[in-house]
């Protein structure tokens, strides 16, 4: 099937050709006709399969077929969980709508930056608004926008929004929308929480699932290197230099760990930058732009970036630490092997992560090859921690049972604490 057969306008087909695409992906070939026909859609597809174009193209087509109101009320609202993903979706809207006449106006709003410039840009009205939930509600509270004429609501990466605790914000936003509207929900997986969210939101939705649930990208080569935790940084440096990796996305479990690893890489002349929730939006944007441009060799990220980074032909993803939630493994490695291209996902696994590795394998339904690098072999597995001896339960005394009389001479004599001890203890507390 070609894009021409999907019923898209000539202007959109021209934009698709400019982007270098000729054949729609499975999610696109199923979602585009459903959206064009006005159906609600519940779609699940693994990352990197073209979900964004699957909803961007048909909504651009539908909007371009109707003349816009002079005041330009928001007609399409796209909600995303992260700033990076919002920016990525906004870029897709502009790219695919570049040949439309008259041009549709779109804006992207998210937190971490000043709100006033966003309010100024919204004054003239917009056709399509891409937003993160928190900043959208801030703008609503400032009377900077109204949502009473939204025709289509799109929840992108809905499962991630639920994971990040946005369910209350989403419900508040939905309450501000017209009851009659089209709803599109795109997700990496059909979890129980997602199915619960769709109840009352979607009306007779077209259900699309183009990949088995919780399946990692088939074109991604996955390998686990067994290594001592203390040698992980040295092994990562070795891999980058030995195989001349020029573009590597590395995931850590914590923000502090990301900063610390970035510093160590830069000390050995491997240009690296960190991206996580504590970084300002300007710093995150600069780091991502430098990574895409090849100025930064290693981008170290926490899971905040797992859904929001879209880099063409990203060859390597490294799990410096396995994620706490096994499902995040899928989202991490989904940054490579995108759009039919091959990629490599490497996990550096220490003894304490063997259980987490098995959980990942159970989730994806396949065993990940375990390998060792000469010079970085793990030492013998540490023995398990001895169990604490169980305390003997106190005998239950009935209320009538006689208690032993206390003898004054047997009381233990307690020395009063020194003032300095009390002070040092209180100084250690956080108030």
Image (cartoon, rainbow, N blue to C red):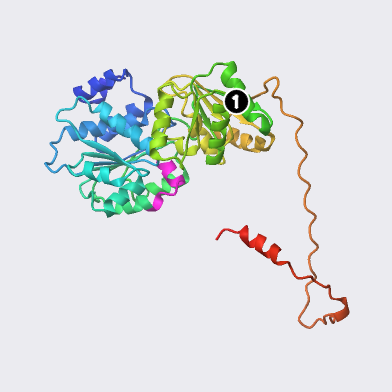
Q: Nearer the viewer, residue 409 or 216?
A: 409
- Check if residue 162 falls in the magenta segment: yes
Viewport quadrant of the C terminus: bottom right
Residue at the (69%, 24%) spot, across then down: 376
Q: Is residue 338 left or right of residue 176?
A: right
Q: Main secondary structure of the magenta part?
A: helix
Q: How many marks?
A: 1
Image position of 89 with respect to 369: above or below:
below
Secondary structure of residue under mark 1: helix
User: As drawn, is 383 to the left or to the right of 429?
Assistant: right
Report the span colored magenta: 157-168
Q: Position of residue 51 (x, y in %)?
A: 36, 31
- The picture places residue 318, in percent across and down from the top left corner, at 55, 28
280 or 347: which is nearer to us?
A: 280
Is residue 173 rendered magenta in the image? no
Instruction: Look at mark 1 in the image and give the residue it sits on.
Output: 236
Point out residue 101 in the picture as x, y percentages from the top left corner: 15, 28
Figure quadrant of residue 369: top right
Residue 75 in view: no
Quadrant location, the N terminus: top left
> How busy is the neighbourhood of tag 1: few (under 14 within 10 Å), some, or many (20 plus)?
some
Q: Can you say whether 1 is above or below 231 in the image?
A: above
Q: Left or right? Give the position of 122 relative to 258.
A: left
Q: Position of residue 95 (x, y in %)?
A: 27, 26
Farthest top residue in view: 243
Q: Identify the residue at image location x=63%, y=29%.
A: 232
Task: Kindly identify the residue that appears in the image at 31 percent across and 30 percent down.
Answer: 91
Asked if 236 appears above or below 157 in the picture, the reply is above
């Amino acid at each position: 099937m070609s894009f021409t057969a999907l019923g898209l306008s000539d202007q959109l087909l021209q934009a698709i050709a400019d982007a270098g695409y000729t054949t729609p992906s499975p999610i696109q070939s199923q979602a585009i006709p459903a959206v064009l026909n006005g159906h609600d859609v519940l779609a699940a597809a693994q990352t990197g399969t073209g979900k964004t174009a699957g909803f961007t193209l048909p909504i651009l087509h539908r909007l371009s077929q109707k003349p816009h109101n002079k005041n330009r009320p928001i007609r399409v609202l796209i909600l995303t969980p992260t700033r990076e993903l919002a920016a990525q979706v906004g870029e897709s809207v502009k790219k695919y709508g570049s040949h439309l006449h008259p041009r549709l106006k779109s804006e992207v709003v998210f937190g971490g930056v000043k709100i006033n410039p966003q309010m100024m840009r919204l004054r003239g009205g917009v056709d399509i608004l891409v937003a993160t939930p928190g900043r959208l509600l801030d703008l609503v509270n400032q009377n900077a926008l109204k949502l009473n004429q939204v025709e289509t609501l799109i929840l992108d990466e809905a499962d991630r929004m639920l994971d990040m605790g946005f369910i209350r914000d989403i419900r508040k936003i939905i309450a501000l929308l017209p009851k009659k509207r089209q709803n599109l929900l795109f997700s990496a997986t059909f979890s129980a929480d997602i199915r619960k969210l769709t109840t009352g939101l979607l009306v007779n939705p077209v259900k699309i699932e183009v990949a088995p649930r919780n399946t990692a990208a088939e074109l991604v080569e996955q390998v686990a290197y067994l290594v001592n935790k203390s040698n992980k940084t040295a092994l990562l440096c070795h891999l980058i230099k030995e195989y001349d990796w020029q573009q590597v996305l590395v995931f850590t479990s914590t923000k502090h760990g990301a900063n610390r690893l970035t510093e160590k890489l830069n000390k050995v002349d491997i240009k690296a930058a960190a991206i996580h929730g504590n970084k300002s939006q300007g710093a995150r944007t600069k780091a991502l732009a430098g990574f895409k441009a090849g100025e930064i060799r290693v981008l170290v990220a926490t899971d905040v970036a797992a859904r929001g980074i879209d880099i063409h032909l990203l060859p390597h993803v490294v799990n410096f630490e396995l994620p706490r939630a096994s499902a995040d493994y899928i989202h991490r490695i989904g940054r490579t092997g995108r759009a039919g291209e091959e990629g490599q996902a490497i996990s550096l696994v220490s003894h304490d992560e063997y259980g987490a590795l098995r959980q990942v394998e159970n989730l994806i339904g396949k065993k990940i090859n375990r390998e060792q690098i000469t010079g970085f072999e793990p030492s013998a597995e540490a023995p398990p921690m001895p169990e604490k001896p169980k305390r003997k339960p106190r005998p239950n005394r009935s209320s009538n049972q006689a208690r032993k009389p206390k003898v004054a001479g047997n009381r233990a004599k307690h020395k009063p604490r020194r003032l300095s001890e009390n002070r040092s203890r209180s100084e250690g507390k956080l108030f």
